[in-house]
């Protein structure tokens, strides 16, 4: 199996510094590692993108580890690697299924906050969308990411019925996302989670959350979501989330889960395992050894 990493902008023969520890851990676990140019991929130069990756005589499985891609770019990347006899672990449709919340929402609807979405981000349509939440608190994000570190200005809306606040927060959110807006906007009901502490800069509440990584429907590893917080020894009910994982249309994905204030567990969101970041607290050596054992 090959693990394929983004290169460094400074030197295209070196791995992107943010993935350096993972790169060496993958090597030490016995994986073949490759490097490609993410910048040339996003610029549309598909042939130069993979110039450092040689074709395989027989088809090999691959896992990408790097920056997020739109579903369209991922499909081009996937198909270009196929020409070199490398098949990424998730097809383009499987990538999209976990990368964009609306794609997988029906699979987790009973275990996740109420959500709705639109690609029409006109204020009139946004207000109409927010009406579905009555006076409940909500957060705004796009199909992939939020501006949670701009919590009060571009993420959290105390009451969906406060139309002035909805307009202000959504407008600021769209301004900050700019050209990086993924598909459209998503409103999600704000659920009170077990509070741990408050972020020192953004004042965002840091709550009891975990990232579970699944490979072939088996748990690779469970991580504390926040590096800034001292967690107790409590972990989520893996059997419960394992059963839900069986219905997810992906071979390699993450499931972010959290404990509600009332003690019950919920799913916050899913993510494609190839582009989901690992917390700083992650043991990368164990991570890649576990992946090797599950392939």
Image (cartoon, helix red, strand yellow):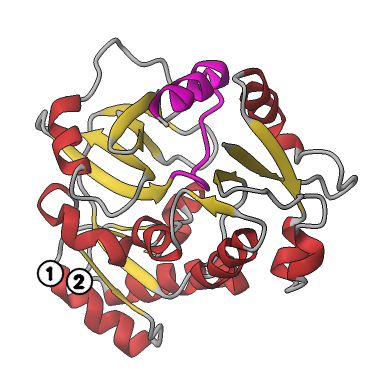
Q: Work out whether residue 228 can be spotted.
A: no
User: Does 149 appear in magenta?
Assistant: no
Task: Kindly state the secondary structure of the residue where label 2 is placed.
Answer: loop
Q: Position of residue 225 (x, y in %)?
A: 41, 30
Can you say which quadrant of the picture contains the N terminus? Answer: top right
Residue 27 in the image: above or below residue 157: above
Q: Which disc is residue 203 wearing?
A: none
Q: Which residue is mark 1?
A: 134
Q: Work out whether residue 57 can be spotted.
A: yes
- Asked which quadrant contains residue 198, the reply is top left
- Asked which quadrant contains residue 23, the reply is top right
If you read the primary sequence from the N terminus, does the residue marked by circle 1 or circle 2 appear first? Answer: 1
Q: Position of residue 134 (x, y in %)?
A: 12, 69
Q: State the residue in front, 282 or 94.
A: 94
Task: Kindly state the secondary structure of the residue where label 1 is placed.
Answer: loop
11 sits left or right of 169 in the view: right
Residue at left offset 59%, top offset 69%: 73
- Magenta-highlighted residues: 273-294
Q: Which disc is residue 161 wearing?
A: 2
289 sits left or right of 20 in the view: left
Residue at left offset 36%, top offset 46%: 251
Q: State the residue in front, 264 or 72.
A: 72
């Amino acid at each position: 199996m090959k693990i394929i990493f983004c290169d460094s902008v400074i030197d295209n023969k070196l791995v992107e510094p943010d993935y350096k520890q993972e790169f060496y851990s993958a090597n030490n676990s016995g994986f073949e590692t490759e490097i490609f140019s993410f910048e040339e991929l996003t610029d549309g130069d598909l042939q130069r993108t993979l110039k450092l990756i040689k074709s395989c005589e027989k088809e090999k499985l691959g896992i990408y580890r790097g920056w997020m891609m739109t579903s369209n770019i991922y499909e081009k990347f996937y198909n270009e690697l196929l020409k070199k006899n490398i098949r990424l672990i998730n097809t383009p449709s499987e990538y999209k299924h976990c990368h964009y919340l609306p794609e997988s929402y029906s699979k987790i609807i009973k275990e996740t906050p109420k959500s709705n979405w639109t690609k029409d981000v006109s204020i009139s349509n946004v207000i109409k969308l927010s009406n579905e939440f009555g006076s409940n608190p909500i957060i705004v994000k796009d199909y992939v990411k939020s501006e949670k570190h701009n919590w009060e200005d571009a993420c959290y809306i105390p009451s969906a019925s406060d139309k002035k606040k909805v307009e202000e927060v959504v407008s600021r959110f769209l301004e900050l996302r700019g050209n990086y807006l993924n598909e459209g906007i998503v409103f999600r009901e704000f659920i009170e989670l077990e509070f741990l502490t408050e972020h020192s800069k953004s004042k965002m509440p840091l709550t009891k959350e975990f990232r579970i990584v699944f490979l072939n429907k088996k748990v690779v590893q469970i991580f504390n979501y926040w590096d800034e917080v001292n967690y107790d020894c409590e972990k989520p009910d893996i059997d419960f989330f394992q059963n839900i994982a069986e219905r997810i249309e992906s071979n390699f994905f993450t499931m972010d889960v959290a404990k509600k204030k009332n003690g019950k567990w919920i799913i916050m969101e899913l993510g494609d395992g190839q582009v989901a970041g690992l917390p700083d607290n992650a043991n990368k050596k164990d991570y890649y050894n576990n992946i090797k054992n599950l392939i």
